[in-house]
Image (cartoon, grey):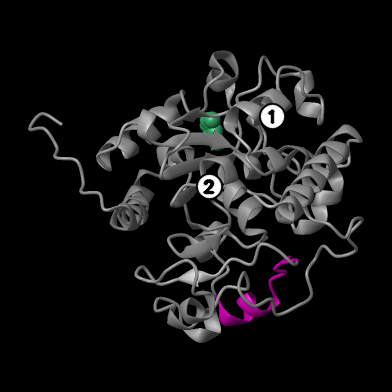
Amino acid sequence: MDSKSAGKSLRAESWLRYADDLGLGPFYLHRGVAHHARDEEPVAASAAGAATAAPAIAAAPQPIALSAASRASDADAKAAERPQIPAQQTPAVEKPAVPPAFVAPVSSVSLFEVRVENDSLERIRTDITPNCTRCKLHKARTQIVFGVGNPKAELVFVGEGPGRDEDLQGEPFVGRAGKLLTDMIGAMSLRRQDVYICNVVKCRPPENRLPENDEIAACSPFLLRQLDAIHPKVICCLGACSAKTLLNTTQGISRFRGEWFDFRGAKLIATYHPAYLLRNPAAKAEVWKDLQKVMAVLGLQPAKRSKTS
Ligand code: URA
């Protein structure tokens, strides 16, 4: 790294720590972490609905839909290639029809634009643990659930936040939904230790409620750093919370589930949360289609099922 880049990196890094130390997390709200609902939100599919839905897309990141075959670097070509969605139904995540819901940035710098040079999962873990008090979730948590898996994974799954089992065991996705996720990973002919699994918020929301905007704002910089440090080929958002956070949109997940987006050099796809599948097993077919898209990008074949399974 030349001295100019090193200087920039140091500035960015010290800015990040400074913002953290001052508890400035909430300024991050203007990036559009606006509204989170579980996966079963209504599908407002009409063209008129698409035109009037508040997209809350701020400056970055600008997710760009990809065709399955296109490359992450060729954004304009990809936008033109989107085969699945007729023009009038193009989700507002790409082209906001109305001004973003969150404007008035407090800072001209966005955490989405900040990268910590030579970052590592160990360093991020040290920055966040053991006693993070950046948001109110610290009050009721047993422990921080940082993330688990291969630090060089090609595939990262991002969930919402720890539940009771995860809070007790310190590992994401170990409860009932986690067992289903483990099965899904197995069906892709992968093991949990091949991928990386983490959440938007690292502490359990009381009573498993949805994470609130200020909590997401305080915690998601660590998620971004995790994703940057791992640098996966594919990020798979599990459920509305992570999809909306990373895609910076208020749209319902059903509007863009199964589509490809660019995200900081990775391909991002959103699918339904395993907890949703436990309540709605019929949606498993849709999720399997999404996972097959991921497998195609990663060159994976479905696992052979044993005769007894
Ligand atoms: N649900 C999530 O979103 N994350 C977990 O870790 C467990 C359940």
Q: Quadrant of ligand 1?
A: top right
Residue furthest front as drawn? 3
Q: Quadrant of the C terminus?
A: top left
Which quarter of the picture shows residue 58?
bottom right
Helix, strand or loop at label 2? It is: loop
| Highlighted range, magenta | 46-58
Q: Is residue 299 left or right of residue 112?
A: left
The verdict on residue 288 being magenta is no
Which quarter of the picture shows residue 118?
top right
In the image, what residue occupies the spot 14% across and 37% down?
Answer: 305
Question: Can you give x and y, in whole percent of width and height, for residue 50 in the image?
Answer: 61, 76
Other residues around mark 2 within 10 Å, as few (<14) / some (14–19) / many (≥20): many
Mark 2 touching mark 1, by CB under 8 A? no
* Observer-nearest of 170 and 125: 125
The verdict on residue 55 being magenta is yes
Q: Is residue 109 left or right of residue 49?
A: right
Question: Can you give x and y, in whole percent of width and height, for residue 123 in the image?
Answer: 65, 28
In the displayed structure, 194 sits above or below 75; it is above
Residue furthest left as drawn? 307
Query: Alpha-carbon distance for marks 2 and 1?
Result: 16 Å
Type of residue at label 2? Gly
Residue denoted by label 1:
205
Question: Can you give x and y, in whole percent of width and height, for residue 51 in the image?
Answer: 66, 80
* Observer-nearest of 251 and 121: 121
Residue denoted by label 2:
239
Q: Which mark is residue 273?
A: none
Q: Is mark 2 within 8 Å of ligand 1?
A: yes
Type of residue at label 1? Pro
In the image, what residue occupies the spot 63% across and 73% down?
Answer: 92
* Observer-nearest of 224 and 270: 224
Other residues around mark 1 within 10 Å, as few (<14) / some (14–19) / many (≥20): many
